[in-house]
């Protein structure tokens, strides 16, 4: 798993990439976020940064209102970087024992450190892809991102009815230098279970960790990866995700 400082470093780098696009092409449409522009992605991401920074320092049980939107004349790039810096300072001050304790959002500081990192990295990819060639996501970070998907989102944000008949998926990151990178996801009538291991599934979806994470978040199509077995299972999986 990526370390807390690794999450901060990757989030800061992604924030800088997102800020660069927001400063130069704010009105560009973002195909991977239908109906959104670069500016909307930037404001969405920046408000998350500022909300988490505020929530980490709020008294226990206090409602934390949404972060304000930047004024129309604001340079979005500078505003993004400033908010990212505020978030890094807040995480450092909170330490590993800190937490967000706003009602409904109660999670540890490390949980939020990881979440804000992956949120920012994927959205930086979104806007870069909208205007040119996106930066590939670091392999080990992408593996951690897939871990987050299967551990955090699949148990609570997956539509079993939409998926249909039970099936298994083997997800395999093919990078040569990775620590780990294989998952078996089993979808049944009782929910979704996953484990980190090599195993045969009804379908195997293989590719770089970066592409596999982007596929799991619906950013690249199944056809962009190497699929073996029942490709319909992979498509049903994407159709059933609600995160």
Image (cartoon, rainbow, N blue to C red):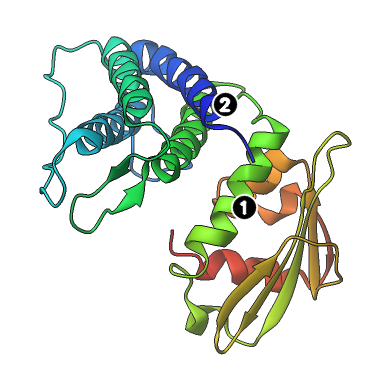
Q: Position of residue 16 (x, y in %)?
A: 45, 15
Report whether 18 appears left or right of 138: left
- Residue at image location 57% in from the left, 63% down from the top: 238
Report whether 235 appears left or right of 154: right
Location of residue 85 by image quarter: top left
- 22 in relation to 121, above or below: above
Residue 220 visible in the current orientation: no
SS class, disc 2: helix
Report whether 117 appears left or right of 108: right
SS class, disc 1: helix
The quarter of the picture where the C terminus appears is bottom left
**Disc 2: CA contacts within 10 A as few (<14), some (14-19) or many (>=20):** some
Residue 6: numbered disc: 2
Residue 169 visible in the current orientation: yes
Location of residue 123 by image quarter: top left
- Residue at image location 27% in from the left, 53% down from the top: 105
Q: Earlier in the sequence, mark 1 or mark 2?
A: 2
Q: Nearer the viewer, mark 1 or mark 2?
A: 2
The quarter of the picture where the N terminus appears is top right
Viewer-side residue, 68 vs 71:
68
Location of residue 192 by image quarter: bottom right
Q: Position of residue 121 (x, y in %)?
A: 51, 32
Between the residue at mark 1 and the residue at mark 2, the CA separation in whole angstroms equals 16 Å
The residue that disc 1 covers is 147
- Residue at image location 31% in from the left, 19% down from the top: 80
- 236 in relation to 75, above or below: below
Residue 197: numbered disc: none
**Disc 1: CA contacts within 10 A as few (<14), some (14-19) or many (>=20):** many
Number of marks in picture = 2
């Amino acid at each position: 798993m990526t370390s807390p400082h690794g999450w901060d470093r990757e989030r800061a780098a992604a924030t800088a990439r997102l800020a660069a696009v927001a400063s130069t092409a704010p009105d560009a449409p973002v195909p991977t976020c239908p109906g959104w522009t670069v500016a909307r992605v930037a404001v969405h991401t920046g408000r998350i940064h500022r909300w988490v920074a505020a929530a980490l320092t709020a008294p226990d049980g206090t409602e934390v209102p949404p972060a304000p939107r930047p004024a129309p004349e604001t340079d979005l790039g500078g505003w993004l970087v400033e908010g990212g810096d505020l978030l890094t300072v807040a995480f450092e001050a909170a330490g590993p024992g800190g937490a967000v304790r706003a009602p409904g959002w109660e999670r540890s500081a490390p949980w939020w450190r990881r979440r804000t990192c992956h949120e920012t990295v994927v959205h930086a990819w979104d806007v870069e892809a909208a205007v040119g060639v996106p930066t590939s996501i670091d392999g080990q970070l992408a593996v951690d991102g897939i871990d987050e998907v299967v551990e955090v989102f699949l148990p609570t944000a997956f539509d079993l009815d939409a998926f249909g008949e039970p099936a298994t998926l083997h997800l395999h990151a093919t990078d040569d230098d990775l620590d780990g990178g294989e998952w078996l996801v089993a979808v049944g009538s009782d929910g979704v279970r996953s484990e980190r291991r090599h195993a045969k599934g009804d379908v195997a979806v293989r590719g770089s960790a970066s592409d596999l994470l982007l596929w799991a978040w619906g950013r690249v199509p199944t056809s962009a990866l190497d699929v073996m077995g029942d490709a319909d299972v992979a498509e049903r999986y994407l159709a059933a995700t609600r995160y």
